[in-house]
Amino acid sequence: MITRALLRTKAAQVLYAGFSAENDWKTIDNELIFCINKYNDLYHFLLLLPSEIVKMAQKSIQISEKKHLKSEKDLKPNPKLAENLYAAQLAKNQNLLDYAEKLGLSWLPYQEEIARIFNILKEQFFYQEYMNSTKNSFEEDKKFWVDFYSSSEIFDETFEDFLEDISIYWLDDELLARSFIIKTIGMHKQNDGNSDKLLPLFKDTEDKRFVRGLVKAVAENNGQYSLLIDKFLRNWEIDRVTKMDIVLLKMAIGELKLFPTIPVSVTMNEYIEISKFYGTDKSSAFINGVLQSIVKRMKKSGTLYKIGGNDEEEFLENEENEELGKEELGDRNEELGDRY
């Protein structure tokens, strides 16, 4: 399931690329849906991992059994992981199998990476604890995979590079995909496996309408939003501001105008957070300051309509946020002049 925070990030990425290439709204919308679907591919691709790891464990036992000179460990190989109940159930999940077949998702070409992951796994404390446990239960086997997907040692920089080589769309989504896989594991109960549900791509149809409507509004009102932003840049030329900052400001304006049930503070905080990852070190304070001014203008002109609560008023009364934005607005002129 994709969150609205990630939907906003995806929208920002495709709008940035679309504006740079001067694409129309339909082209940008197609790219948005493609990017979102790539996240769903990653979610399913990573869910296929337990079956592959178990196969590697089974293969390891077979190798031990075929040795002529067997160590004590070879004589009594531990079958606990090879017989993991949850992995066996997941391997029969028809929803997962159907999706993988339809999209051609498979770990078969990546056996070297599977072996690397398996070797790292065997060094982890949670693996040793699991293998030495005398318990044998479905819940314990589920917990093993929660620990597995939570491991930063397994899903390391090498793994990130591996994913990027498969798809450039996957790099930024890997951590979120793992978090939702952990939620998926938590939902599953012991059964025949065929009926286990996976998380839907969207929480509901409203989320899909939200992100597509937002992208359409920004693309179709690009010029109008630029003029509005320009009024609050003081002595700056709009083409001297970073492009991603402008995209985020336009998205915030579109969201403020189009979605009356989303509080002002939520909209502002979301784009300030995104700017911390995709802007400069001054972007968050800059966007905060400009949006404070834009929201005040919209309220004064009666073009800001929100349903219920006084959340936006409480946010705008935060003098610390506002003064920080004003201070940084002055500093950015010199900084941007040096960079462009």
Image: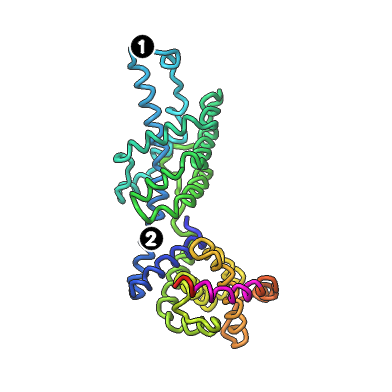
Label annotation for residue 69: 1
Q: Is residue 74 above or below residue 153?
A: above
**Color style of the picture:** rainbow
Image quadrant assignment for residue 193: top left
Position in image of residue 28 (x %, y %):
36, 70
Magenta span: chief secondary structure = helix
Q: Is residue 2 something that shows in the picture? A: yes
Q: Residues within 10 Å of mark 2 (few under 14, many from 20)?
A: some
Position in image of residue 298 (x %, y %):
58, 83
Q: Residue furthest top?
A: 69
Q: Residue at x 35, y 26 (%)?
A: 59
Residue 42 belongs to the span the image colors magenta: no
Q: Is residue 125 above or below residue 155?
A: above
Q: Residue at x 66, y 71 (%)?
A: 321
Front residue of this view, candidates 330 and 97:
330
Position in image of residue 145 (x %, y %):
49, 38
Front residue of this view, candidates 176 and 290:
290
Region rendered in magenta: 324-336
